[in-house]
Image (spheres, rainbow, N blue to C red):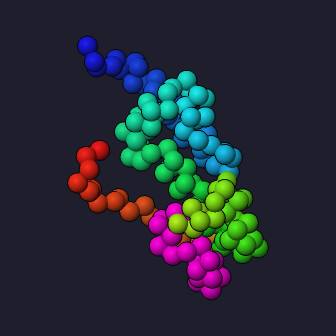
Amino acid sequence: MGSRSAEERLSDLARLRRVRDRMDREYAQPLDVEALARGVHMSAGHLSREFRRAYGESPYSYLMTRRIERAMALLRRGDLSVTEVCFEVGCSSLGTFSTRFTELVGISPSAYRHQAESGTEGLPSCVAKQVTRPVRETPTRTSRSG
């Protein structure tokens, strides 16, 4: 029989929460799906499938969103260059960082930094954080099934 027991599903959900919490804490560390899966005794494929089922996005996508949120805060602070921010949040490629940042935020990191310098001045940091939080657009389905 192919169905899993409720106990197995609950066990997986607990492990997925541990993975998500680890990404929230260690976003700046070099994390990959294989290492995350090993940490909770799951295969990388199973972790990816179950994470997407539970949270609506892949582990990589979730991690990049955390990194971009942190990058936004560092860029608003204004004392680090875009390159320094990229490495500070755990990205190893400035190109990938800039591409993902632009996808999530809608403008490049340097444009965001310039806008933040002029646009959120005088706002309490908690308000600036809420106003500038990245909004994940749900991509439109293509003809691929998945």
Q: Quadrant of the N terminus?
A: top left
Residue drawn 26% across the image and 57% down it: 142
At horizontal 39% and vertical 24% (from top left) the residue drawn is 9
Q: Is residue 101 left or right of residue 81?
A: left
- Residue drawn at (35%, 59%), measured in percent from left and top? 138
Chain part drawn in magenta: 100-119
Is residue 26 at all visible to an observer of this figure? yes
Front residue of 101 and 9: 101
Residue 101: x percent and y percent?
Answer: 54, 66
Residue sitting at the far left: 143
- Please state the horizontal and vertical placement of residue 95, each as a whole percent of the image: 59, 65
State the image quarter where residue 111 is shown: bottom right
Residue 141: within the magenta? no
Left or right, 48 with reference to 130: left
Residue positioned 55% across, 75% down in the render: 108
Residue 14 is at least partly visible in this image = no
Question: Does 65 appear above or below 26?
Answer: below
**Magenta span has 104?**
yes
Q: Is residue 7 above or below residue 133?
A: above
Q: Is residue 72 shown above or below 59? A: below
- The quadrant of the rendering that contains the C terminus is top left
